Image (cartoon, rainbow, N blue to C red):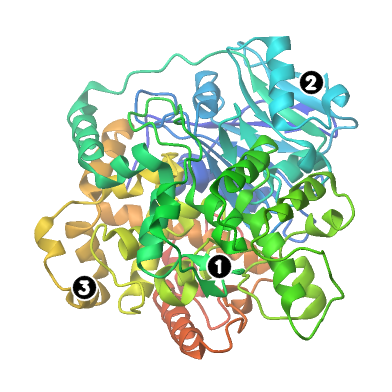
Amino acid sequence: MVFLIMWKPKVSKINLSENKIYPKEEIPPNVVEAFLGGRGITVYLAYQTIPHDISPRAPENNIIFGTGFLTGTTFPSAGTVVATFKSPHSNTLCTSVATGKFGAYMSNLNLDFLQITGCAKAPQYILIDEFADFGFFDASEFWDFDTSSTEAFLREKHGNNISIISIGKAATKQVIFAGASIDQMHYFRRGGLGAVLASKNIKAILITEPPQLSQLDQSLEEEIIQLQKEIDLSKWSEMLKSRGTFSIAYLALEHDTLPAKNITRKVKLDPNKLNSFEGYKDSLDCLSCSIKCNRNSYGAFTSLGPNLMIGNNEDIQKAIEKCDNDALDPISTGATIASLFNIQEDQRKLLDINLGMNWGESQLYSLIDKIENKEGIGDQFSRGENFFYHQTSEASSITKNQIGNMFYYPNILGVSLMTGISSFKGDNFRTDSIVYSELLGMPFKSKPKSSKGKSELVIMLENMGAVLDSLVICPLYLPLLFKSKKWIQMIPPAIQALLFHFVPKLFLNRYGINLLLLTSIINKSLKSNFRPNDLFEVGNRITLLERLFNTRTGQTHYDDTFSLFLPKRKDFFNKYRSLLYNYYIIKGLTGSGLPSKQTLEKSRLIGLVTV
């Protein structure tokens, strides 16, 4: 039995329709034990309070911001925050993760969880002062500002020592993939949080009191030194420092997984084109983090560049900046444009579309302005990349109404499976974390085109991702917990895959992820007695609860699959179906993708929630 006695988080609730702030409620200890914090508890609260059959834009769609027991401390990435809500983009439960400082600002005022429901009668912003008092102020004057102008307006009014979540004009005009910005450098990119905030008439959330970071317990000194050592030695942190997640582009090109033409082709590109991409020339300013990642993003570059067949690096960067300036998700923006061009090119002319532009022409970036303002065809673009396919029934690489990540799926099977089964696309390097094994060889090599051991590996990384989101650790920290055992790298990948297939937990525990370090940090922080295997159970419980919510909305196994969008690659779809079937068996799901009663009992969800 695990006893959590050191952290007793509370949830603060706001009902915008009634202009009512409720007294804080303590999260029950058994819920904290079962879900840890962050994503786990926000998913639990969302499951309990969001009606499954409502529109994501309905007042009843709660937004729940969450922190963890490491938030606001000197632990690396202590300013990260998560937000869980029903996504207007996917119609599933979505948890989006944003780095920066906002989480620490929340923790400093003992705002462990903030639940927002209802809809304000007029545009407003929420200000939380140094006493944790909530104020509601008119936002009509700057309602249609982009996020950059919004932040400048609010900083002039309230000073610079604040942290701001803000939305742009794309969100206020209800573009379903409009995200939210934090301090104009960090983003809730995916899932459409901005559109949900706008549907509640909320333009921004401000916290005025700068955080005073609390020191970690002295008993944790050894673990923090070890973690910092892993960070300093990791090739992944070096890649992040130098080029950000954009570094993945070189490996994707090398393994023939860099996509083109709406993920229907693989890119043949001169590596020098990648070398010449400068992108952002500054680094992220995440709280307590020594890495200082370069801001360049693989997903943003690929979606707005190669996948649209555009090779002009300067134009690509301008398009990325245009999206970031208004917190538009760049992956969905590029994918939405690509979906229309894909249909326009089709010889059957299922839709009568002629934009006067073609693949590879930088002038198509003018469509971003149309999306942002919902002008002309931009009104249709604003409904997401699946909107046009719904009208044509043409096959596409979309699951749950959206593109997952920017890879040519037939050549990277693990990422394909993780893309399909993921309940949300909140953070790509979390929901597609198997990319570390398939492209970086971390913690061990897994051939991208091989299906051996992939279902097992996807489940392990899916569960570990849920745990780290519940600790509210930066999404890019997962590889920093990988063990660097050189002798493992000497074992042929096929043998590694077999070992992982037959003894997955043992293999990952001992030779893959440094779970002893993670459990030691948790146990010393909480005075608890978690074991490494307990963490897998926590992650499994969270992902099952997400799936349970989504199945109540009508999601089935069809939503985990791709339509036959590549007629000449039937081999890929056969392998994918086999991997998905194997995933269901190991996860304890029925053939329809539903958690079985036995699985729910084993996970202890029965008794924690109403099933």
Residue corresponding to mark 3? 493
Q: How far apart are the alpha carbons under marks 1 and 3?
A: 28 Å
Q: Does residue 610 appear anywhere in the picture?
A: yes
Q: Are marks 2 and 3 in contact (CB under 8 Å)?
A: no
In the picture shown, does residue 188 fall above or below 210?
Answer: below
| Amino acid type, residue under disc 3 in the picture | Pro
Quick one: SS at disc 3? Answer: helix
Residue corresponding to mark 1? 260
Which percent across, then down, holds residue 58? 82, 49
Quick one: SS at disc 2? Answer: strand
In the picture shown, does residue 141 fall above or below 573?
Answer: above
Q: Does residue 537 appear anywhere in the picture?
A: no
At x 31%, y 41%, the residue is: 237
Which percent across, then down, holds residue 460? 35, 63
Q: Residues within 10 Å of mark 2 (few under 14, many from 20)?
A: some
In the picture shown, does residue 160 fall above or below 117?
Answer: above
Q: Are marks 2 and 1 in contact (CB under 8 Å)?
A: no
Query: Viewer-proximal residue, 77 or 410?
Result: 410
Give the label on residue 136, or none: 2
